[in-house]
Each structure stands twice: as structure tokens, then as C-alpha cells.
Image (tube, rainbow, N blue to C red):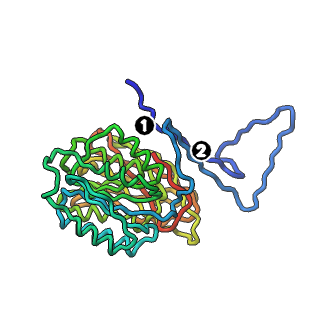
Amino acid sequence: MATDWDKIIFSDEKKFNLDGPDGFNSYWHDLKKDPLHFSKRNFGGGRLMVWGAFSSAESSFNSSCTPATPSTYLFAHSNDLDPEIVLDSLDTVSSKLDFFQTKYVTFANVRFDKRGGEEISYHSDINNFTDSVKNQLPNSTIGFLNQTTGSDILNVIQKFLENDRCGSTILVLLGRNPDDRNDVSRIIDQLQKQRVFVRTVVFESPLGGQNSSVMYNFSSETNGICVFSYQNEFDDAVDFCTNGIQNEYLLYAYNPFVSGQGSLQLPPLHTPSYFYQKIPVAVEITVQDHGVPYDFRALNLTVTATNGEVLTIIVDRARFVQFNGYFDEILGLGRDQDFELALDYNYSSTNMEALEIRMSVNQPISTWPPYT
């Protein structure tokens, strides 16, 4: 079987200790000369963690695109949804955009999954944005005639990317799966190059295409997030999926794959050098890449600081009456520190499960987290 190298990323990390060993007591020197040791410690030691990755895919990230670049928030809803669901979702999104953020300066909306398609509308005013959504609520008389027809959301995303969308977010309220296409990897690559995040809310049993992983992959591989929802709790899932508006600067993203029970060491985290000592970090976790998590039992995410402080996030399904696979929590982490991350997980089956782990802050940072 041939290997698709465009879908493979080689990555590694290395920690460099400054002015001091890390438990290693041997070194190389010229035996013909006397050993020498130089040490200078004016302000203590320190360490630097370097992470790098490469793949066969072409990379052309825009160096002028930074996390602080003003950007666009696109509200995209399927014509298959109930109008009341869209109105409730709009109320949640518009209030967060209006009161809890400064990054998004352009507000866009589009209704998809209708015959003939529809153009994306752009607004600089939140009131015009909400009025536009209300004027384009779902209407069954203009929808697709066949329930098995795949969603046209990928066409919407391609249209959105025709202009520079640095750091934008696409919120997708999905009623049916799109069909799998040969150009999915290329579209995801375009999203990554423009640092566009896709956040998707989808029913547990949507209409349309048979491959439910398409939009999950769009969300996960762009460092966004995908939340699966029960039919009667869609508005709650939208509330979860839009937490990124209040903490709009992504600090950490990783997508581990696990199976059964075990432990996993995750890439390290470094907090920004803000002026206050403790930084509120919003943590989001989804526990699988399909439907409602019947096989999930529990996981522990342990965050260990270099000073020995240990914080643990416990996600136990037994704690929830109706768990849709999404969990969030706020951690207070020290500024300008390195943290080791470890994951303990417990699933009732040995099926491979994909997780999403996101950490965000509400103040600008200087760099983007890598894609995994």
C-alpha cells in the first residue's frame, strides 16, 4: 500500500538546560588537557524547550499573520436546523462577540445546505450581523430535496478563503455531513496557512453523507474543536463550542490518539510572560471523534510546573447526567513557566479514539501553537 506522505508529520522536541545539568554527570573532553569547568550564575539557570515539525506538504505561512491580527468571525448555519435552534445559537454567539472579546472586528454569516447556495454577508456592526442572520433563518421550502445529499459546507469554506482571513474563526452549525472529497486535505492546508480555526457543532445522527469524520477533521486539524450534540441540547453545545470567543488566543493544541486504558506524555506547555503572576488558562477537552461517548469512562490531565506544583483535571463520565463528550475548566498557571503534561485515560473498548485538547487565554500572545 502506498504511503500518502502529505498526511504525515514528523515532529520532535528538545530541552536545553542553561547553566546547569539535568541529572547527567558525564561529558567529553580532551584527555591530553586538564579538564576545565566554567560557571556563571548571575540570575539562576533556566531551560528552553524547542519543538519542531516538518512534512512533505508545501508550507507558506504568512509571517505578518499574528494572533493579535484583527480577524473575522463567520457564523455558518445549516438550512436543515430548526429556526429556534439558530435563534438561540445566535443569541449566545452575538452576546459573546459583543461583550467578551476585541479580536474579531468583522462579523460574517451564511446559510448553507439550500438549493442554489448563498453568498456570505460581512458586517462591521454586531446589530447588522444579527439582523442578517434573522433574515436568513432555515426554510424547508428551499432545502435539499434528498436527505442523503451531502452538505455543501466545504464550498462555503472555500469561498470564505478566497480573501485573506488571518486568525479568523468559522463556527459551523451542521445538520448533515458533507460528502468526502479528494480536495479535503488541500482545503485544510489552506485553512492552516491562514491560521483559520473551524469550530463545529453537529447532531449525533446527522443527515447527508456517511462519513462523519470529515468536519471533525476540519475542526481538529485547524486547532479548532468539534462538539457532538444530543438533539435536545444543541444550544448548550453551541455555548460550549463558542467558549473560544471569551478566550480568543490559543495557547496550546494537541490531538492525541488513545485506546483502552493507559497513560500518555503530551508535548510541554509554556505560559506567556504577562504582568500578573497567575494566568487564567481555559482548558477544553473532547473525548472522542464520533457521536455521544458510550465507551468513555474517565481521564486525568496532569499539569506539572517546574517548581513541583501539580494540577489535575479529572473528567469522569459518572459525574455527568448526560455527557456529550465536551469538558472545560479554568486553570490558574504561573506566568512564563514550563509545564509537563501527562494524560491518563480509561475507555471500555480497545477502539482507537481521537481527543482534542485546547488551552486558551484572553490576552494576546506572540506565536501560534503548532498543528498536530
Q: Earlier in the sequence, mark 2 or mark 1?
A: 1
Image position of 231 with respect to 349: above or below = below
Q: In the figure, residue 320 lies in which quadrant?
A: bottom left
Front residue (pair 108, 342): 108
Label 2 Cα neighbours within 10 Å, binned few <14 / some 14-19 / many ≥20: few
Quadrant placement of the C terminus: top left
Q: Which residue is mark 1?
A: 7
Task: Answer whether labels 2 and 1 touch (C-beta < 8 Å).
Answer: no
Q: Which mark is residue 334?
A: none
Query: Mark 2, mark 1: which one is toward the viewer?
Result: 1
What kind of element bears circle 2? strand
> Identity of the amino acid at label 2?
Lys
Count up the numbered dots: 2
Tell me, yes or no, if residue 371 can be seen here.
Answer: yes
Q: Residue at x 83, y 43 (%)?
A: 36
Q: Which residue is mark 2?
A: 14
Image position of 370 with respect to 277: above or below = above
Q: Position of residue 100 (x, y in %)?
A: 40, 73
Q: Position of residue 326 (x, y in %)?
A: 31, 57
Tell me, yes or no, if residue 324 can be seen here.
Answer: no
Q: In the image, 240: left or right of 357?
A: left
Quadrant placement of the N terminus: top left
Q: Residue at x 38, y 51 (%)?
A: 356
Q: In the image, 62: left or right of 328?
A: right
Image position of 207 with respect to 107: above or below = above
Q: Position of residue 73 (x, y in %)?
A: 38, 63
Front residue (pair 70, 121): 121
Q: Position of residue 39 (x, y in %)?
A: 78, 52
What kind of element bears circle 1? helix
> Identity of the amino acid at label 1?
Lys
